[in-house]
Image (tube, rainbow, N blue to C red):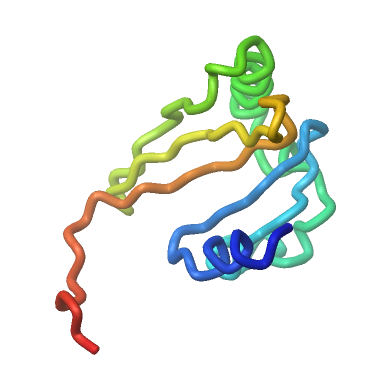
């Protein structure tokens, strides 16, 4: 992974877990390692994402990845809203330069207003 791109992911406050097309976890950013600590944290790398989900969730993951594969234009699916954390969750297709599907990840978008002061440096 290019170091610039990796740096972007590593600085993100939201968890980022990237899986290959066999559903193996190939990358977790620091926020994801902390978020999923009680399920193994960094030890989840190299394991199947499917092992971390119930049967219904596994079925939906398969459907989404099949949809990603069906067209280069199929790249983003809204999967859930978490009211406890006030966030939307998406699955996102990752494609190579030829627009072939190479992996996917889960994207978290928090709805809470930022509490940090603007340009408070």
Tell which residue pokes out farthest to the bottom in this image.
Answer: 121
User: Residue at horizontal 78%, vertical 64%?
Assistant: 43
In the displayed structure, does residue 53 sit left or right of residue 82? Answer: right
x and y, in percent, of residue 52 in the image:
69, 44
Q: Quadrant of the C terminus?
A: bottom left
Please tell me in which quadrant of the rendered image residue 60 appears: top right
Tell me: residue 106, above or below residue 60.
below
Tell which residue pokes out farthest to the top in this image.
Answer: 70
User: Residue at horizontal 67%, vertical 27%?
Assistant: 58
x and y, in percent, of residue 53 in the image:
65, 38
Q: Nearer the viewer, residue 60 or 84?
A: 60
Tell me: residue 50, above or below residue 68.
below
x and y, in percent, of residue 104 in the image:
64, 37
Q: Quadrant of the N terminus?
A: bottom right
Tell me: residue 70, above or below residue 112.
above
Q: Nearer the viewer, residue 37 or 18?
A: 18
In the displayed structure, does residue 107 sit left or right of residue 113? Answer: right
User: Residue at horizontal 61%, vertical 63%?
Assistant: 29
Q: Number of marks in the image?
A: 0
User: Residue at horizontal 78%, vertical 57%?
Assistant: 45
In the displayed structure, does residue 97 sit left or right of residue 93? Answer: right
């Amino acid at each position: 992974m290019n170091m610039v791109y990796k740096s972007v992911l590593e600085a993100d406050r939201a968890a980022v877990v990237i899986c290959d097309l066999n559903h193996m976890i190939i990358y977790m950013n620091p926020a994801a390692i902390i978020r999923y600590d009680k399920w193994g944290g960094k030890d989840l790398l190299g394991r199947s994402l499917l092992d971390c989900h119930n049967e219904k969730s596994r079925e939906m993951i398969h459907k989404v990845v099949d949809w990603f594969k069906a067209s280069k234009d199929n790249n983003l699916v809204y999967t859930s809203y978490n009211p406890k954390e006030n966030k939307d969750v998406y699955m996102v297709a990752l494609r190579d330069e030829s627009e072939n599907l190479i992996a996917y990840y889960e994207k978290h978008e928090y709805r809470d207003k930022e509490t940090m002061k603007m340009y408070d440096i």
